[in-house]
Amino acid sequence: MYVQTLRFPGHPQEIAENSVDLAHLRYIHGYDSVNRVEPASIDGHHMVSRFDFTSRRKVARVATLTFEISADTDIYGLGYSFVSIREHTIGMDMRLWILATPVDGELVDMTLASQVREIRNPKRLLVGLGFLPTRLRAPLMNRFMASRQRQDVLDDVVIWGRKKYVSPPRLNRSDGEIMAYRAYCAQFYADPNDCSATS
């Protein structure tokens, strides 16, 4: 398990919104072939978003590799998301916990905890991955993936830092299921007309 925490100006709602904002995966993070597997679904406090994408990354400044990834995201409220990741070309399975905790009215702590399942028989020899002892493969890939996740978050922080509140929001079809996500989030806020919420 690898755990890292980043602190930045933001809000937990914005963080989980990335799981339905598939256009940003292409334009902010440079992922290709971003496709929703099925429409996002909501069941009370639980929201599910499933999508596939490809990612081209340089490894050790030696080779550019293409990763084919499926992500199944389970969102439980504003501060807890669990993502099951399958990388198809290697045959790697990974779990990612995304925990967002407000620090004050401006800052949020985002904790990323990741874990890669033991890789016994990699489908491809990823820059020598197959030559490493089995016990070292998963920790090595976990560190590599964690560094990519951190960079993705830092790319998002730039966008979140420039946000402006606009009502109604300026969205188009490529923004996908953002409004459904925001409607889902409304249940986690107190109703301003409900006097009992302050009692």
Image (spheres, rainbow, N blue to C red):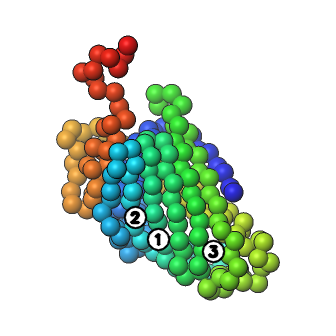
> Mark 2 Cα within 10 Å, few/some/many (few <14, many 20+)?
many
Q: Nearer the viewer, residue 110 or 51?
A: 51
The first of marks 1 and 3 along the sequence is: 3
Which residue is at a point 59% across and 51% down the rendered structure image?
Answer: 112
Amino acid residing under circle 3:
Val
Q: Position of residue 198 (x, y in %)?
A: 36, 16
Distance in Å between CA atoms under marks 3 and 2: 27 Å
Label 1's element? strand
Tell me: 134 left or right of 126.
right
Return the residue found at the far bottom.
124
Amino acid residing under circle 1:
Ser
Distance in Å between CA atoms under marks 1 and 2: 8 Å
Which residue is at a point 31% across and 37% down the rendered structure image?
Answer: 186
Amino acid residing under circle 2:
Arg
Which dot marks residue 59?
3
Question: Which of the 4 image quarters holds residue 92?
Answer: bottom right
Q: Is residue 168 above or below residue 191?
A: below
Question: Which of the 4 image quarters holds residue 123?
Answer: bottom right
Label 3's element? strand
Tell me: 75 left or right of 112.
left
Q: Mark 2 points at which residue?
A: 50
Q: In which quarter of the image is the N terminus?
A: bottom right
Which residue is at a point 45% across and 46% down the rendered structure image?
Answer: 76
Q: Is residue 98 above or below residue 115?
A: above
> Mark 1 Cα within 10 Å, few/some/many (few <14, many 20+)?
many
